[in-house]
């Protein structure tokens, strides 16, 4: 009790209630990856030990990410190389959710506006640059241009379905916060008057896949994330407990002004075992 209250006072952030009581019933954990377990090549201190300890205690875990600049295999290799004990099947990404959705659409013709590193994950689908049924948009770094946006505008206006791997506002890099693809997706939506289907966080469908895999009721699951919108807002909307960590893209002023209130605010993922009572 005292620890959670102390953390609340120390950070000065509003929360939904007493974190410790809420966490009593946690039986499984979703870890956001980027900004929670590592930033770039730097492991968040204590993150490897936290994952190991929760695993030791028998909690089912899943590792979720909106990152679309790395293949599924690449993500797994990176986590393993950094020292995390994670299996490839425990990683759920916006890309893997999109693959599930496209399979359900029964072989649509697709235009993939995605990073070369994840293009291979979509190899099973038919590519069609001129007359796609679906336009799939992910991170493409500095390849965004007026010409590209205008081309996508034309395709979506003519009836192609827009799938956005995510709609994040910004992300944390080793150089600081950088603009993410959310504004480009929003721009295409605005210009065409059509809505994109969002694959990753905070989409309820994405969290439901994770919950289904954990085999737990949402109120028994905590999501640990650095993104108050996608991780905490999305997780709480799905009925989970949202634990916001003050690493990665976390910014105090942004969190304070948000209408979303985390169930618990922690300096970093390293504090998680203690507040779970381990
Ligand atoms: Mg993150």
Image (cartoon, rainbow, N blue to C red):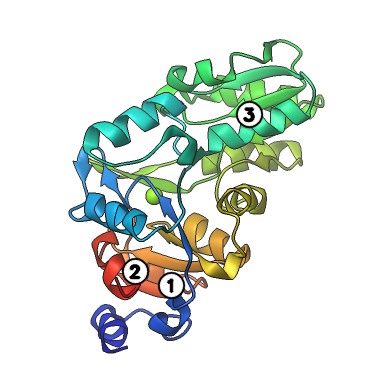
> Where, by quadrant of the figure, is residue 155 drawn?
top right
Q: Mark 1 points at which residue?
A: 257
Dot 3 and dot 1 residues touching (CB under 8 Å): no
Relative height, residue 275 to residue 139 (above, below) = below
Give the residue drawn at x 48%, y 74%. 261
Location of the C terminus (image quadrant): bottom left
Local secondary structure at mark 3: helix
In whole angstroms, how far apart are the C-alphas of marks 3 and 1?
Answer: 35 Å
Residue at 45% x, 17% y is 116
Give the Cα distance between marks 3 and 2. Answer: 36 Å
Coordinates of residue 43 in the picture (x, y in percent): 21, 45
100 in relation to 243, above or below: above
Left or right: 110 with respect to 175? right
Q: Residue 253 carries which label?
A: 2
- At x 29%, y 60%, the residue is 269
Check mark 1 vs ligand 1: CB closer than 8 Å? yes or no: no
Q: Give the residue displayed 59% in from the left and 48% down from the top.
A: 213
Relative image position of residue 149 (x, y in whole percent) = 59, 26
Residue placed under numbered mark 3 in the picture: 99
Residue 179, above or below 260: above
| Up/down of 239 relative to 24, above or below | above
- Residue 204 falls in which quadrant of the image? bottom right
């Amino acid at each position: 009790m005292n620890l959670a209250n102390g953390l609340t006072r120390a950070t000065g952030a509003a929360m939904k209630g007493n974190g410790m009581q809420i966490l009593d019933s946690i039986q499984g954990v979703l870890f956001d990856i980027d900004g929670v377990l590592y930033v770039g090549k730097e492991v968040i201190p204590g993150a490897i030990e936290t994952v190991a300890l929760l695993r030791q205690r028998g909690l089912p875990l899943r590792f979720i990410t909106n990152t679309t600049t790395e293949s599924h295999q690449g993500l797994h290799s990176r986590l393993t190389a950094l020292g995390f004990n994670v299996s490839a099947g425990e990683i759920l990404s916006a890309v893997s959710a999109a693959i599930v959705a496209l399979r359900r659409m029964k072989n649509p013709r697709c235009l993939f506006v995605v990073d070369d590193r994840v293009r291979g994950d979509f190899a099973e689908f038919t590519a069609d640059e001129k007359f796609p049924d679906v336009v799939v948009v992910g991170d493409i770094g500095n390849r965004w241009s007026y010409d590209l946006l205008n081309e996508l505008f034309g395709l979506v206006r003519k009836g192609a379905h827009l799938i956005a791997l995510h709609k994040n506002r910004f992300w944390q890099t080793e150089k600081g916060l950088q603009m993410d693809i959310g504004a480009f997706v929003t721009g295409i939506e605005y210009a065409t008057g059509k809505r994109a289907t969002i694959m990753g966080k905070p989409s309820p469908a994405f969290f439901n896949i994770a919950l289904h895999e954990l085999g737990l009721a949402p109120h028994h699951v905590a999501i640990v994330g650095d993104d108050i919108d996608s991780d905490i807002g999305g997780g709480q909307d799905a009925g989970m407990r949202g634990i916001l960590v003050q690493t990665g893209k976390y910014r105090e002023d942004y969190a304070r002004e948000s209408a979303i209130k985390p169930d618990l605010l922690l300096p970093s993922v390293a504090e998680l075992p203690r507040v779970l009572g381990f």
